[in-house]
Amino acid sequence: MRLDIVIVNWNSGPLLAHCIASLPQASVGGVRIGSVVVVDNASQDGSASVSAPAGLQVEIIRNARNVGFAAACNQGAQAGREPHVLFLNPDTELSPSSLAVPLQGLLGDASRRIGIVGIALVAPCGERQRNVARFPTPAHLLGQALGLDRVAPALVPPRFMTDWDHLDTRDVDQVPGAFMLMRREDFERLGGFDEQFFLYMEDVDLALRARNAGLASVYMHDCVAKHVGGGTTGAVQGVRLFYLLRSRILYARKHFAPAGIAAVIFAAMLLEPLVRLTVAAARANGNAAMAVLRATGWLWRAYPFRRAIDRGQPRAWEQDRR
């Protein structure tokens, strides 16, 4: 029942302090938190200057630049040594049920079938979030670029399983990325997060690699944490879109056949930007249109994405904050 907690922080404001303050109440039922490792990706809002609650060891790793979410998660994992590791978003707050039940699930898994455990996340209003996800396919990503997952969900099911009430425990493709609990040895055997994903799709990639290695992802409905959602990326639309489209292409190149790769590249670099521009024009939303144009420009300049930090892409988000 021992674990380390890794939190990647980037300008999360008061959310990180609230998250850390909630951790002691989850140390019940035999749970022992060895260390909380906060990896700060060059925040400029002072959010990483947090105090450790009594009895909790908090280590802060301060990066001189934003190295991306996947790389920062790996940094944090390497700093711990407990047999389990929890990757936790700073916009979450744990409850007394958040840790004991999923840890018991892993410890009771005699066949070691389970690789990743996620729990129920609820919005601040108390509504249960339906954010368990399906593995994307080329057809799904193409339909998503056209917006068909929103206007015709029967034809193109949304990636998030909004059709399921999330009120039972089951094997899933991917648990919510805001709370991912693993055995340390499984995480290390899989090679950690793939650092070519600066942001987005790194959790999907890890879940798929775990599945391919015979490790299931399990969603547990009877343990809960509060989740604000979008706490640190909501204000940077253009950069967020750039990394989303870039990560889809990287995921396709890693997991799809050539025809699927070509379809995803076409959708990400041409089709989806045109659809988004059309929607922005119809709504007379100039800010949204400019965000799409900036993201598309970065995407074309950075392609073919041969490094974790590509020439022509926005540096540590800041280019879009004007």
Image (tube, rainbow, N blue to C red):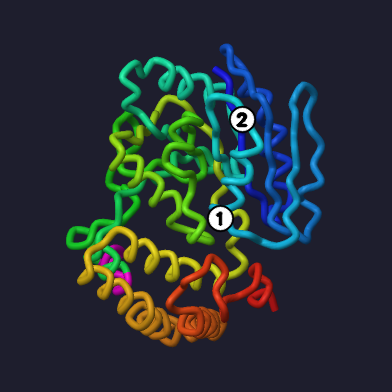
Residue 163 position within the rendered picture, expressed as x and y whole percent measured from the top left: 27, 47
**In the drawing, does residue 114 fall left or right of residue 302?**
left
Q: How many marks?
A: 2
Q: Nearer the viewer, mark 1 or mark 2?
A: 2
Does 56 appear above or below 64?
above
Q: Residue at x 31, y 38 (%)?
A: 213
Q: Amino acid at mark 2?
A: Asp
Judged from this view, the residue extending furthest toward the top is: 30
Q: Position of residue 204 (x, y in %)?
A: 39, 50
Is residue 134 visible in the rendered structure shown here?
yes
* Residue displayed at 68% across by 29% down: 35
Q: Which mark is residue 230?
A: 1
Residue 259 vertical placement versus 204 (above, below): below
Write the residue at 51% across / 44% down: 178
* Residue 285 is at least partly visible in this image: no
Question: Magenta segment: does it hold 130?
Answer: no
Q: Is residue 149 magenta?
A: yes
Find out whether the residues at labels 1 and 2 contact each other: C-beta distance under 8 Å.
no
**Dot 2 surroundings within 10 Å: few (below 14), some, or many (20 or more)?**
many
Task: Report whether 51 appears left or right of 216.
Answer: right
The residue that mark 2 highlights is 4
Q: Which residues are magenta?
A: 145-151
